[in-house]
Image (cartoon, rainbow, N blue to C red):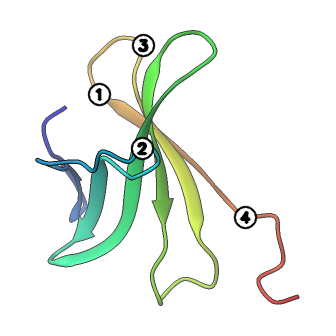
Amino acid sequence: MPPLTTKGVRVVKLDNPSANKKAPTHRIYVGRSEIGSGWPKTSDDDRDYLSLTFDFPGLVAPVYAILIKDLEGDGYSAYWSRSKKPVFE
């Protein structure tokens, strides 16, 4: 996937991802600031997608999202949610 840019947010694949299988393969930027990371996953119906986590000081809690190619193949769709865990226990 080439770098995806929309509304100033860029999802960029790392040139040299870590050998650690749990490490992210993508970084998410606004301008020069990193605001999140992404990991490749496969859905139950064998569609590849990126699992994204947005977390930076401006957020009260992390935002979790997926970025998946549209069925028509013309673009991508993003679906997101917030954590259901309390921020402070």
Report the mark closest to the observer, 4 or 1. Answer: 4
Q: CA distance from mark 2 to mark 3?
A: 20 Å
Q: Which residue is mark 1?
A: 75
Q: Which residue is mark 2?
A: 39
Where 84 falls versus 24 (above or below)? below
Q: Quadrant of the N terminus?
A: top left
Residue 50, image x, y percentages: 42, 38
Q: Which residue is mark 3?
A: 71
Q: Front-most of 78 and 18? A: 18
Labels 3 and 4: the sequence-earlier one: 3
Give the image quarter of residue 10. bottom left
Q: Residue at x 52, y 10 (%)?
A: 46
Q: Secondary structure at mark 2?
A: strand
Q: Determine whether, in the image, residue 4 is placed left or right of residue 62.
A: left
Labels 2 and 1: the sequence-earlier one: 2
Q: Residue at x 35, y 32 (%)?
A: 76
Q: CA distance from mark 2 to mark 4?
A: 18 Å
Q: Front-most of 57 and 9? A: 57
Q: CA distance from mark 2 to mark 1?
A: 19 Å
Q: Which residue is mark 4?
A: 83
Q: CA distance from mark 1 to mark 3?
A: 9 Å
Q: Residue at x 57, y 64 (%)?
A: 63
Residue 53, image x, y percentages: 49, 59
